């Protein structure tokens, strides 16, 4: 099975948990057992794999198995010296979410989470709006409540540019980008009401033909911020 | 030998992870409405403008 398919399967499990369907969520249960692609899928989805733990009633308490698989992902796929900004930011996001939602133990060197790497932030102010919008959409997992507050503040200053990017992505029929931007916009204050974000998110999900990662962004926008119908 | 193959597979998977994290934006043609309107107005103005005056031919004998 290709990695993208494993990522889609895990994303589907997260979506079901966020919607409140099925058994209480446990990350280690939605991952393919003993599959070397499991840590890679966690690294790709980033903080989103822990999203149901932020909704108390949608999951069992995170356990040692969940902690182990996330540690494996962080150890196996750290951003290299030539890694993109997106790679560094998503790695940061996964560490921050793990600290907040998984057991860990800062006093125990073996169970402490890795240090958060420095991530460049100049692009937030300097990127032209189409590029900014695309990059922000790739970081939609960080639009998690309380995560990456500096990034959220920087993007809030460019809310209009993200709104333009949302419209652009819809017109290009780039549903994943549109969903990611819609999720950021759901988190940010002062989104122009003329954008029609709620109906836009519903439209994006309907048009995406069941794309699990699109559904994940849309459901997260609804569950955490009450946007998107 | 097996170790070498494992390393290659691991490297390939790392590349795959990076490419899924940071893929290139899909190709698409985007028309900025305001830019298109400005270009249309410019084209209209050019078409509606009178022809460029040419110097009159003067016969020299």
Image (cartoon, coloured by chain):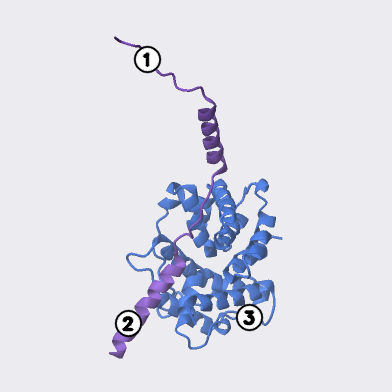
Chain colours: A blue, B purple
At label 3, counting other C-alpha atoms closer than 10 Å, the crowd grade (few under 14, some 14-19, many 20 or more) is some
Relative image position of residue A44 (x, y in whole percent):
48, 71
Q: Nearer the viewer, residue A97 or A194?
A: A194
Label 3 sits on residue: A60
Question: Are the two marked residues, 3 and 1, in contact with CB atoms closer than 8 angstroms?
Answer: no
Q: Nearer the viewer, residue A81 or A212?
A: A212
The answer to whether residue A25 shows anywhere in this view is: yes
Label 2 sits on residue: B7
Residue farthest top in this picture: B61
Label 1 sits on residue: B57
Label 3 marks a residue whose chain is A
Question: Are the two marked residues, 1 and 2, in contact with CB atoms closer than 8 angstroms?
Answer: no
Q: CA distance from mark 3 to mark 1?
A: 93 Å
Relative image position of residue A176 (x, y in whole percent):
56, 63
Rendered image quadrant of residue A63: bottom right
The answer to whether residue A224 shows anywhere in this view is: no
> Residue sitting at 41 percent across and 64 percent down?
A88
Residue farthest right in this picture: A229
């Amino acid at each position: 099975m290709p990695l993208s398919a494993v990522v889609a399967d895990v994303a589907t499990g997260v979506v079901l948990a966020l919607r409140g369907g099925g058994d209480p969520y446990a990350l280690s249960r939605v991952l393919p057992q003993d599959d070397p692609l499991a840590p890679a899928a966690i690294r790709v989805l980033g903080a989103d794999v822990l999203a149901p733990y932020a909704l108390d009633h949608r999951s069992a308490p995170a356990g040692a198995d969940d902690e182990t698989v996330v540690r494996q992902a962080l150890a196996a796929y750290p951003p290299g010296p030539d890694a993109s900004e997106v790679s560094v930011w998503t790695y940061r996001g996964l560490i921050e979410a793990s600290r907040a939602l998984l057991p860990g133990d800062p006093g125990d060197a073996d169970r402490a989470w890795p240090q958060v790497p420095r991530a460049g932030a100049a692009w937030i102010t300097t990127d032209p709006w189409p590029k900014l919008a695309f990059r922000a959409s790739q970081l939609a997992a960080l639009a998690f409540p309380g995560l990456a507050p500096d990034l959220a503040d920087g993007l809030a200053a460019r809310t209009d540019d993200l709104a333009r990017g949302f419209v652009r992505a819809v017109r290009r029929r780039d549903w994943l980008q549109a969903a990611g931007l819609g999720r950021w916009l759901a988190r940010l204050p002062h989104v122009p009401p003329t954008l029609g974000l709620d109906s836009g998110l519903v439209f994006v999900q309907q048009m995406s033909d069941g794309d699990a990662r699109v559904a994940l962004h849309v459901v997260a926008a609804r569950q955490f911020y009450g946007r998107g119908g | 030998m097996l170790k070498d193959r494992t390393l290659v597979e691991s490297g390939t998977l790392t590349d795959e992870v990076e490419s899924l994290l940071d893929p290139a934006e899909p190709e698409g043609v985007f028309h900025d409405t305001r830019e298109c309107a400005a270009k249309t107005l410019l084209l209209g103005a050019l078409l509606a403008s009178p022809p460029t005056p040419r110097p009159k031919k003067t016969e020299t004998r």
